Every structure is written in C-alpha cells, then in structure tokens.
C-alpha cells in the first residue's frame, strides 16, 4: 500500500477505538506495516479525536528513525519488534480498555472460555510480565506472551493485539475485551468452565488457516 493510504487507515482506526471505548484521550497506540522496512504509527501525546492522517508518523523498523516533526508513540520499538518477529502481522493495536486493564492488574491469564476468543485471539490470553513502558524488557516480555497468540495482556498496563490487517487487529481487540469482561463476571457464579485445550488450539488454527480466509480481513 501507499504510505498515504496507510496513514489514513491508522488515523481512522484511532477514531474507531476512541468511539468504541477501547481507549481514552491519548492513551494506547496503533500502527500498520507499510512494507518490510517501514510502518506508520500514531503520534505521541495527541488526542485521537484531533488527529489527522498527516499526523501519522512513518518509522523505520530497523533503527526507529522517523519522518516529520511529530514524535511517534513511545512504544514504537515494541511495534517494530512485533513486525520483525511476526512476518504475517500487518497491524498492532495497544489499548487501555477497562476490562482488559482490570484483568491485567490482577495478572490473571484467561483460559479458553469462549469460542470466538480461542479462534481469534488464541487458546488462552497470557499476561506479559510487568516492565516499564518503552523499554526493551517490556518488548521482550510482550513478544513472549504473544507467541502463538493474536493478543495478550500487559501486567498492570493494558492490552496488545495484532492482525494480518488493521480490521482484524481491531476485531481482536474487541474479542479480547469481551473475554476479559466475561472472565470477570463469571467469577460471581463459580468461575468459567474451560474448553478442552486441544480443541482450543485446533479452533485457533482453523480460524487462521481456513475460516478467516473467507472473510474480508
């Protein structure tokens, strides 16, 4: 895709996240891969409601240098490493959604409790060990938590989701947030009954290799 098209997609996704309640103000960040060398990411410290496509920042994946006067998100290093580690990932979204943050603060891994969760996010939702934002340690922890998954929780921080497109990453954010909400709610009625782990893995692979290819992602 052309850079201008990717900038518009990232800007539009930020406004969608804001209207959906998955982020507030300037929190969180969104990126999309342009090619094997570059990505477009949201700027640091600017409200999603006020952002325009021209505000989106083009960043080099290798050395994190960037174009323009606006600074890219402080998490650009994390996004870049995900793209280098996961060649099929074309979008990364980090949110501070309410229920996601709640479970992240409790540092609770979510087992396979919902069909759509295991299909789209993965057979469980892991929690990346705590580290300060923008550090190499956080990046290392997140890469580990995302292994074999399209989403993870960041301990005492928020959530991160990936996708083969920006639309798929957005849907993954929504499904992860729903899974977190239900995980919290079912504690009041004795906890969730889990889907068999083997079946959960099989469902995730089916989604990735067959079902999702029928959809527009």
Image (cartoon, rainbow, N blue to C red):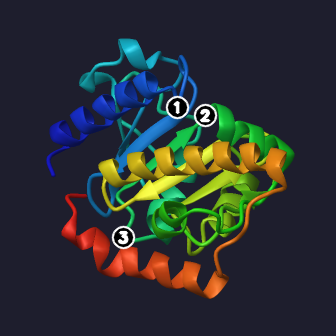
- The answer to whether the residue labelled 1 contacts the one labelled 2, judged by CB atoms less than 8 Å apart, is yes
Nearer to us in this view, 125 or 88: 125
Q: What element carries label 3?
A: loop
Percent across and percent down for residue 216 are 20, 58
Nearer to us in this view, 116 or 131: 116
- The answer to whether the residue labelled 1 contacts the one labelled 3, judged by CB atoms less than 8 Å apart, is no
- The residue singled out by tag 1 in the image is 22
Disc 1 and disc 2: Cα gap in Å? 4 Å
Q: Which of marks 1 and 3 is nearer the N terminus?
A: 1
Q: What element carries label 2?
A: loop
- The residue singled out by tag 3 in the image is 88
Q: What element carries label 1?
A: loop
Instruction: Tell me: residue 217, above or below residue 178.
Output: below
- The residue singled out by tag 2 in the image is 97
Q: What residue lies at 62% left-to-right and 33% top-to-bottom? A: 96
- The answer to whether the residue labelled 3 contacts the one labelled 2, judged by CB atoms less than 8 Å apart, is no
Instruction: Tell me: residue 209, above or below residue 171.
Output: below
Q: In which quarter of the image is residue 102?
A: top right
Report whether 73 appears left or right of 137.
left
* Residue farthest front in this picture: 189
Q: Which of marks 1 and 2 is nearer the N terminus?
A: 1
The answer to whether residue 130 is seen in the rendering is: no
Percent across and percent down for residue 164 are 34, 62
Disc 1 and disc 3: Cα gap in Å? 24 Å
């Amino acid at each position: 895709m052309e850079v201008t098209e990717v900038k518009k997609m990232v800007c539009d996704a930020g406004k969608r996240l804001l209207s959906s309640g998955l982020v507030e103000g300037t929190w969180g960040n969104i990126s999309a891969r342009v090619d094997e060398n570059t990505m477009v990411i949201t700027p640091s410290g600017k409200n999603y409601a006020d952002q325009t496509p021209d505000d989106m920042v083009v960043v080099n994946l290798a050395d994190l240098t960037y174009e323009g006067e606006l600074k890219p998100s402080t998490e650009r290093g994390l996004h870049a490493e995900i793209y280098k580690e996961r060649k099929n990932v074309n979008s990364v979204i980090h949110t501070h959604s309410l229920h996601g943050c709640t479970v992240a603060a409790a540092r609770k891994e979510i087992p396979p409790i919902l069909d759509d969760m295991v299909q789209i996010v993965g057979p469980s939702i892991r929690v990346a060990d705590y580290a300060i934002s923008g550090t190499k340690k956080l990046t290392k922890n997140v890469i580990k938590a995302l292994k074999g998954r399209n989403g993870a929780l960041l301990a005492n921080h928020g959530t991160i989701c990936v996708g083969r497109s920006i639309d798929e990453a957005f849907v993954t954010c929504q499904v992860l947030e729903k899974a977190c909400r239900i995980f919290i709610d079912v504690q009041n009625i004795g906890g969730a009954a889990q889907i068999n782990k083997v079946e959960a893995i099989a469902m995730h692979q089916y989604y990735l290799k067959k079902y999702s290819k029928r959809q527009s992602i």
